[in-house]
Image (cartoon, rainbow, N blue to C red):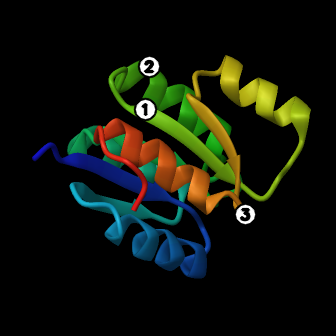
Amino acid sequence: MKELKVFLADDSEPIRQQLERALSLIDGCKLVGTASGGNDAIELIRSLQPDVVVLDISMSHREGIRVLREIRKEVPVAQIIIFTADPSVVLQEVCLEAGADFYLHKTQIQDLIDILSVQLGESTP
């Protein structure tokens, strides 16, 4: 079975917990690390080399767009999913131009599950 290594970066503990529960529903999806701040996220992503990074825009120490740009340069194989509470179309365009593969609102957890399931070559649970 294929394994998909996922990393979560979000400053909200309840959101990280909710995403961890959602990921646990997907066979083959393995959470390899989490971070609440941008600096920690960059360091951990460098060392863990995940297949997918789920990244919030608003984080302490370094905001998500800067993190996005840095990891896009350094970890080019990673798929980056922006998962944010900000529905701004302008911000969505900025993130996609900076290298994000997807831009999801935090209410779109099912869409996140669907994207990861497709990466694993499976249907949604």
User: Which residue corresponds to the image point at 44% horizontal and 19% vertical from the top-left?
Assistant: 73
Q: How far apart are labels 2 and 1 at the CA level?
A: 12 Å
Instruction: Mark 2 or mark 1: name the one nearer the start of the chain.
Output: 2
Q: State the residue position of label 2.
A: 73
Label 1: how many Cα within 10 Å (few below 14, some 14–19, many 20+) = some
Q: Which residue is mark 3?
A: 107
Name the foreground residue: 118 vs 51: 118
User: Is 121 positioned to the left or the right of 11 in the image?
Assistant: left
Q: CA distance from mark 3 to mark 2?
A: 29 Å
Residue indicated by mark 1: 79
Q: Position of residue 94 (x, y in %)?
A: 77, 25
Q: Quadrant of residue 93?
A: top right
Q: Secondary structure at mark 2?
A: helix
Nearer the camera: disc 3 or disc 2:
3
Task: Identify which residue, 120 or 103, lies in the foreground.
Answer: 120
Between circles 2 and 1, the one closer to the viewer is 1
Write the residue at 24% across / 59% down. 30
Q: Position of residue 68 (x, y in %)?
A: 56, 34
Q: Earlier in the sequence, mark 3 or mark 2?
A: 2
- Label 2: few (<14), some or many (≥20) within 10 Å? few
Q: Is residue 49 above or below residue 54?
A: above
Q: Amino acid at mark 3?
A: Thr
Task: Name the residue type under label 1.
Answer: Gln
Q: Quadrant of residue 53?
A: top left
Position of residue 85 measured from the top left corner of the image (x, y, whole percent): 78, 59
At label 3, counting other C-alpha atoms closer than 10 Å, the crowd grade (few under 14, some 14-19, many 20 or more) is: few
Type of amino acid at the residue the image marks with label 2: Lys
Above or below, 110 against 4 in this view is below
For the residues labelled 3 and 1, the Cα–Cα distance comes to: 20 Å
The mark closer to the camera, 3 or 1, is 3
